[in-house]
Image (spheres, rainbow, N blue to C red):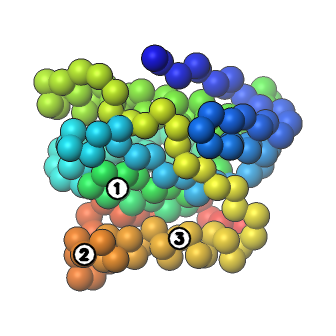
């Protein structure tokens, strides 16, 4: 079953619940994790999947959200981002993630000559309220490839980076 498309913009706090609770706050900054539906589908952190995912994550940076940090792991993706405000309201985080997952699923299925769901329907999102929250999550995100034994030096992970965002 296809998840319901979220609104494009929000104007006030939005609380939704599937299996997980989701709180969106206008002006909020979020730590987000997207997980594969079936980890055996592909290894995200290999070319060409890794490069396509990085390009897709960076695509709307500065236009629909400010991207702070990201890393693409073999079976999940971490991002820290802040939706941007327009005259129509704040871009809705759920809609941004919905669109990102929809596009990248199509691309991954095309690379594998496959079909079907690629991502879990729900994303894990955490509202960052203090600079210390951001610093903790950014450090975790940066060190994740090393902690998982994928690389000795986190600075050498090809699928980690920073966007245009400057936190606080």
Is 93 situated above or below 9?
below
- CA distance separating discs 1 and 3: 13 Å
* Residue 74: percent from left, percent from top: 27, 55
Direction left: furthest residue: 113
Question: Which dot marks residue 72?
Answer: 1
Q: Is residue 67 visible?
A: no
Q: What percent of the width, then of the height, locates residue 13?
A: 83, 40
The residue indicated by pointer 2 is 149
Observer-side mark, 2 or 3, equals: 2
Q: Residue at x 55, y 49 (%)?
A: 124
Which tag, 1 or 3, sits closer to the chain's start?
A: 1
Residue that carries the numbered disc 3 in the rendered image:
138
Q: Within 10 angstroms of label 2, few (less than 14), some, or many (20 or more) residues?
A: few
The numbered mark, 1 or 2, whose residue comes first in the sequence reads 1
Q: Is residue 10 left or right of residue 22?
A: right
Identify the residue shown where x is 72% and y is 67%.
168
Tally the numbered discs.
3
Residue drawn at the location 79% of the way across and 44% of the way down: 26
Work out how far the residue at label 2 is from the one at label 3, CA to CA, in angstroms.
18 Å
């Amino acid at each position: 079953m296809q998840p319901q498309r979220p609104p494009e913009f929000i104007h006030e706090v939005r609380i939704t619940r599937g299996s997980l609770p989701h709180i969106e706050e206008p002006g909020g900054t979020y730590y987000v994790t997207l997980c594969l539906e079936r980890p055996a589908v592909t290894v995200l952190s290999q070319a060409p999947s890794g490069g396509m995912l990085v390009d897709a994550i960076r695509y709307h940076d500065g236009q629909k959200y400010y991207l702070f940090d990201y890393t693409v792991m073999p079976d999940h993706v971490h991002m820290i981002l802040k939706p941007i405000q327009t005259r129509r309201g704040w871009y809705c985080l759920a809609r941004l993630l919905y669109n990102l997952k929809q596009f990248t699923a199509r691309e991954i299925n095309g690379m594998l000559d496959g079909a079907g769901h690629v991502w879990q329907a729900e994303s894990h999102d955490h509202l960052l309220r203090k600079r210390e929250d951001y610093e903790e999550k950014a450090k975790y995100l940066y060190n994740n490839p090393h902690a998982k034994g994928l690389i000795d030096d986190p600075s050498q992970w090809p699928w980690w980076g920073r966007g245009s965002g400057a936190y606080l």
